[in-house]
Image (spheres, helix red, strand yellow):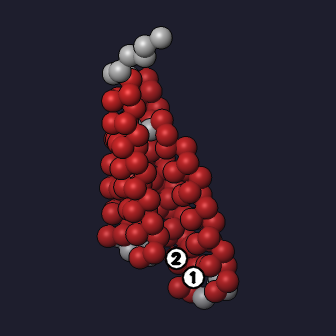
Amino acid sequence: MKKFKTGLIKAISSLVLGLLLTAVVGYLAKQGWLPDYSIIILSVINIIANLLTLKKMRGWGIFYTLGWLGGSLLFKLLGLLDTLDFYFNILAPCLIFILRIGLWLGGSRRSGRKRRR
């Protein structure tokens, strides 16, 4: 239960921080206080951060993946996630999840067989 509580606190704090940062950057961009190239740089940093996060997903379960997808949908509905980032945030976890299921099914079939010596 301690891991669940820690994970829940991290998830909520990450969501709140993400909302705040997205709102601030969006406001600064709408006011024209951020040059166009800085928005591109921030988008590239976001994609790299997402890729690094997905790389660590090996040990994460289905609930984290569902939370990731739900959070992406929420951000899109609130207008805090542009279309390219939304597609990336939906497609990448789904592909990784499908690959993990395939590896799990392949591994469970192999582990059921005993080796003869």
Callout 2 secondary element = helix
Quadrant showing the N terminus: top left
Q: Amino acid at mark 2?
A: Gly
User: In the rendered view, would you say 110 is above or below 34?
Assistant: above
Label 1 Cα crowd, 10 Å radius (few <14 / some 14-19 / many 20+): some
Residue at 44%, 59% (x, y): give it.
92
Percent coordinates x, y for residue 12 in the rendering: 43, 46
Percent coordinates x, y for residue 51 in the rendering: 56, 57
Percent coordinates x, y for residue 117 in the rendering: 47, 11
Residue at 63%, 66% (x, y): give it.
45
Distance from disc 1 to disc 2, alpha carbons, whole Å, reads 5 Å
> Residues at badges 1 and 2 in contact (C-beta under 8 Å)?
yes
- State the image quarter where residue 78 is shown: bottom left
Return the residue at label 2.
26
Residue 58 falls left or right of residue 41 = left
Residue 17 has which mark? none
Return the residue at label 1.
29
Residue 108 falls left or right of residue 27 = left
View extreme (top): residue: 117
Frontmost residue, 99 versus 91: 99
Residue at 66%, 74% (x, y): give it.
41
Q: Amino acid at mark 1?
A: Ala
Residue at 58%, 72% (x, y): give it.
43
Residue 38 falls left or right of residue 73 = right
User: In the rendered view, would you say 113 is above or below 104?
Assistant: above
User: In the rendered view, would you say 33 is above or below 15?
Assistant: below
